[in-house]
Image (cartoon, grey):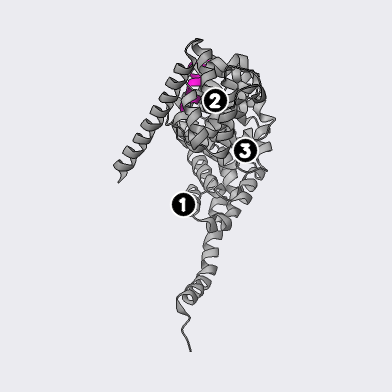
């Protein structure tokens, strides 16, 4: 008779362990129901990297929410971290956690003077807001102003997670005005200034700004913030492919809304070299947006059909003549040369980075 082989041995072992494992997990859930803080910590440990345990320990959600409501600091923190792990990459658990009444205590923790608890609650709201089912519930709960407050006053990780959560909620169009009403743009710009322009946080900040700048209130807030437009231009030049796409989208949204009002602020921050590079090296969407913005930044407000062929050289020449009114060709050549120089410097930096990791 043939031996079961490696796969057969694993199946037999799994079958043998399953009853005892299930009994152990049931016992663990019972301990959580009894209010044992260590049991909540064990749930957190088991669900940190195991989708299987997240499914099997879903029964712990309701007692963990009860523990979260208890008000005891140690119990609340343990329950919060366990619920956070249960929600990661598990849509059913995300929904179950809100159905069990977790939102109210989570909002309380968002306002905690303990910055660690505030950070964990922000991470939980971020994770739960990834569910399309949960977004309307979180939006209606009053979470938006609390998240913006965290964005202004929280620790660095909480600020990053608050931006991500606000971005998730901004995909519901009705939430954009609610976000704008609590003045998010100054802290968004400050957060971008303090980090790498190519970071995921910068990507989400620019994505959120692109949506907020569809409103006059958002555009006024950005241009009133010192260095606001410049910060977006810096992401346009130095950001990730996704960040640059959102950055050019944000600038385009501004210019499309009122060319005469926003054309000069964009030009004055030196957006042209980055836009020209993006027409060649951006994502497909970035290229389209960059061409559209360059067309708006040109000297003439007329459509392409009334102009010379819409080459980059002509666009730059028109922009150059608007800036100083003289020496159109010389200025255009100078700006194109600057663009080439910037591209070469960026390429050199990329090569240096690669060499440093070799």
How far apart in space, not on screen, are marks 1 and 2 (Cα)?
A: 30 Å
- Return the residue at label 3: 103
The majority secondary structure of the magenta stretch comes to helix
Residue at 51% x, 65% y is: 21
Element under label 2? helix
Query: In terms of sequence position, does the residue under pointer 2 or pointer 3 come before the other?
Result: 3
Q: Which mark is residue 45?
A: 1
Query: Of tags 1 and 2, which is closer to the observer?
Result: 2
Taking depth in this image into account, of 161 and 218 the one nearest to the observer is 218
Task: Determine whether label 2 and label 3 are within 8 Å by CB.
Answer: no
Q: Residue at x 58, y 31 (%)?
A: 289
For the residues marked 2 and 3, what is the alpha-carbon distance in whole angstroms?
A: 17 Å
Residue 265 at least partly seen: yes
Magenta extent: 225-234
Real-space Cα separation, disc 3 to disc 1, in angstroms: 23 Å
Disc 1 or 2, which lies upstream in sequence?
Answer: 1
Mark carried by residue 149: 2
Please determine whether, in this image, residue 205 is positioned above or below residue 76: above
Residue at image coords 58%, 39%: 69
Magenta-span inclusion, residue 127: no
């Amino acid at each position: 008779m043939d031996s079961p082989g490696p796969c057969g041995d694993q199946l037999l072992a799994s079958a043998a362990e399953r009853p005892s494992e299930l009994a152990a997990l049931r016992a663990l859930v019972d301990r959580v129901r009894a209010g044992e803080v260590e049991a909540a910590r064990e749930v957190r440990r088991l669900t940190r990297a195991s989708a299987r345990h997240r499914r099997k320990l879903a029964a712990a959600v309701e007692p963990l929410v009860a523990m979260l409501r208890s008000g005891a600091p140690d119990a609340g923190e343990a329950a919060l971290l366990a619920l956070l792990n249960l929600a990661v990459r598990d849509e059913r658990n995300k929904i179950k956690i809100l159905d069990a009444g977790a939102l109210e205590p989570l909002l309380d923790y968002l306002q905690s003077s303990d910055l660690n608890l505030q950070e964990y609650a922000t991470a939980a709201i971020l994770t739960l807001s990834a569910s399309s089912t949960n977004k309307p519930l979180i939006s209606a709960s009053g979470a938006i102003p609390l998240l913006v407050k965290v964005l202004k006053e929280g620790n660095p990780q909480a600020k990053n997670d608050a931006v991500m959560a606000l971005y998730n909620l901004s995909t519901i169009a009705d939430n954009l005005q609610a976000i704008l009403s609590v003045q998010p743009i100054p802290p968004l710009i400050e957060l971008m200034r303090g980090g790498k322009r190519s970071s995921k946080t910068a990507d989400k900040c620019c994505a959120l700004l692109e949506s907020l700048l569809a409103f006059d209130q958002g555009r006024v807030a950005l241009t009133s913030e010192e260095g606001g437009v410049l910060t977006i231009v810096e992401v346009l030049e130095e950001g990730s492919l996704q960040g640059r796409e959102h950055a050019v989208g944000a600038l385009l949204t501004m210019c499309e809304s009122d060319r005469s009002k926003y054309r000069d602020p964009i030009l004055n921050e030196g957006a042209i070299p980055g836009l020209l590079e993006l027409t060649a090296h951006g994502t497909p969407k970035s290229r389209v947006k960059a061409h559209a913005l360059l067309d708006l930044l040109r000297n003439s407000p007329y459509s392409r059909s009334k102009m010379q062929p819409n080459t980059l050289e002509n666009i730059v020449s028109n922009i150059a003549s608007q800036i100083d009114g003289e020496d159109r060709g010389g200025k255009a050549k100078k700006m194109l040369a600057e663009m080439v120089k910037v591209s070469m410097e960026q390429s050199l930096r990329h090569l240096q980075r690669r060499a440093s990791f070799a």
